[in-house]
Image (cartoon, rainbow, N blue to C red):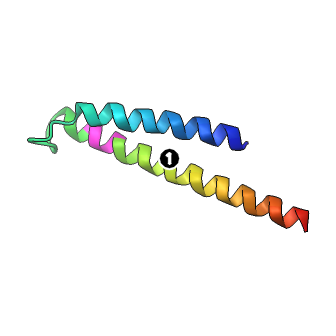
Amino acid sequence: MIKTTYIISIIALLIVVYNCTIIDWANPFSGDSIIALIAVMCGLCCILVMTILRTSKKIQKLENKN
């Protein structure tokens, strides 16, 4: 499960990087830039959720050990 969360986080990071190249920084709230901004935010949320999941799995493993 932990390896899967790392793989998903890496894919989300690649999506964030790719969409940052699409954003028109002169006018970020028009056309394709707004879609890229939304995709960047979604990717960052995915990374955050995967980090929380990994942390909760580590805590669960420590609880089961005791």
Instruction: Identify the amino acid type marked 1.
Output: Cys
Left or right? Give the position of 17 relative to 9.
left
Question: Crowding at label 1, few (<14), some or many (≥20) Cα neighbours within 10 Å?
Answer: some
Residue 16, percent across and down?
38, 38
Mark 1 secondary-structure assignment: helix
Q: Quadrant of the C terminus?
A: bottom right
> Which residue is disc 1 drawn over?
46
Left or right? Give the position of 10 relative to 14.
right
Left or right? Give the position of 13 relative to 49.
left
The single residue placed furthest to the left in the displayed view is 26
Residue 54, percent across and down?
66, 53
Main SS, magenta residues:
helix
The image quarter containing residue 8 is top right
Q: Is residue 37 magenta?
A: yes
Left or right? Give the position of 26 relative to 42.
left
Tell me the magenta residue range.
Answer: 35-39
Give the residue displayed 74% in from the left and 63% down from the top. Answer: 59
Residue 22, percent across and down?
24, 31
Give the residue displayed 16% in from the left and 45% down from the top. Answer: 29
Q: Quadrant of the N terminus?
A: top right
Give the residue displayed 50% in from the left and 47% down from the top. Answer: 46
Figure label count: 1
The image quarter containing residue 24 is top left
The image quarter containing residue 34 is top left
Residue 25, percent across and down?
14, 41
